[in-house]
Image (cartoon, helix red, strand yellow):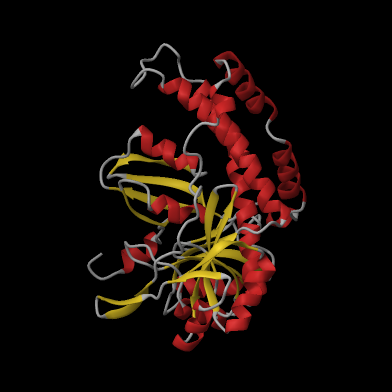
Amino acid sequence: SVTFDTALADATVAELLRRHGVRAAEVFTIAGGMDTQHRVYPGQPADSAIADARLSTIEYAQGMLCSAPRRIEDQLSQNPALPEPEPGVRERTLRGQLAEAEWLRAALAVARSGRPVIYGVTVVGTAERLDGLAGDPLVGAVERGNVSVREGQEFTVVSPPRRPAGAGGLRSLPPQIEALPMPEVRRRLEAIVREGFPECREYALERGGALPRSQAERATFVCDWHPARPAAERIIADVRLRSGDANRTPTEVDLRGLRSAGARVLHLFNVAMVRVEIPTDRIATLVRGPDPVAEWAATVPDPRNFDVEVQIFYGRPPQSSDLRALEGLGARVLGGLGVRGVVYAVVPDAAIPRIARLPRVTNVRAQAMGCAQALEARPGG
């Protein structure tokens, strides 16, 4: 992993990678204290990888901001007569939501502005090239990966770059929000619920107005296409790779298999999922062929949206505090509460590494789906 002394401009990082002949595997950004992590697919040019990281940072900040009114409305609608876990919790929560809204607007403004946001990368390269990179004046620290063996297979463990001071969100309430009378806090929050944010009105128009009608409905392939096979000869699809009960991220072997099926890789998720452009008739082979590589696939109505369906596993049944932590990272909880300690949710891809680090979370994996016909056909099944 490579940590920079200060956040660097996009073009500076791309040139640094080219100059030292190393390939980025992950890009780490910070915008107004909001830090995110972005995977790079093998073979992706440096300029493209850095541009994708910028776009993902903007998408994550915008998604978090535009989901804030729903979270605020949920909090405002709570019955004030209900007892608090401890005195003042409800008031601190409301002040915190107002502070978060202002913080997210500032983070989005930084991400959109083009200002330097990249504080580190993980890279792949020869020992000689890594030595050269470590001596570059732009680089603060380089930490080599360690080779480990699990189930007979070797893999490299790389620590992420050091997070800058101020990363991870708000740690305390700004004095100006602490000083507001509670009626004014409520008035401002109610205005957010009622009016939303100007950035989100633009966002809704961008996301809703540019999609062809033929792509407006999501189609899923598990046993077959549902509700119907897409009419287009090529589609953009999210392909859920086989991973067993554990989580994993896409490998070069996965990507070779997808490319051999005529796919063009567009995005690697932080779970066993790849977004591709692919001939429609190749999806069935990936999922139900003689050597399947995927559990299921689904068309992507909005290619600019990088939300992903996941299962979040806890060491014990999740509590309300766990759900608030998920919602604070932009998750939309769908169900599964209290069932074997599993929560089903739709989350921004960039939030997955942070969700995996939450207390009591033991695993985050892409939503699993299997074909009942295939299960019935198995011997002894």
- On the rendered structure, is 149 left or right of 190? left
Q: Which of 372 and 122 is in front in this view?
A: 122
Q: Quadrant of the N terminus?
A: bottom left
Outermost residue, left side: 380
Q: Which of 217 and 192 is in front in this view?
A: 192
Q: Which percent across, then down, holds residue 225? A: 55, 61
Q: Is residue 88 above or below residue 251?
A: above
Q: Which of 304 and 117 is in front in this view?
A: 117
Q: In this view, does 245 lie above or below 86?
A: below
Q: Quadrant of residue 138?
A: bottom right
Q: Is residue 101 above or below residue 263?
A: above
Q: Quadrant of the C terminus?
A: bottom left
Q: Nearer the viewer, residue 28 or 307?
A: 28
Mark count: 0
Q: Kindly tell me whether residue 50 is visible in this rendering.
A: yes
Q: Kindly tell me whether residue 303 is visible in this rendering.
A: no
Residue at horizontal 52%, vertical 68%? 121
Q: In which quarter of the image is residue 202?
A: top right
Q: In which quarter of the image is residue 106?
A: top right
Q: Which percent across, then down, holds residue 30? A: 57, 54
Q: Which percent across, then down, holds residue 206? A: 75, 49
Q: Which percent across, then down, holds residue 92? A: 46, 24
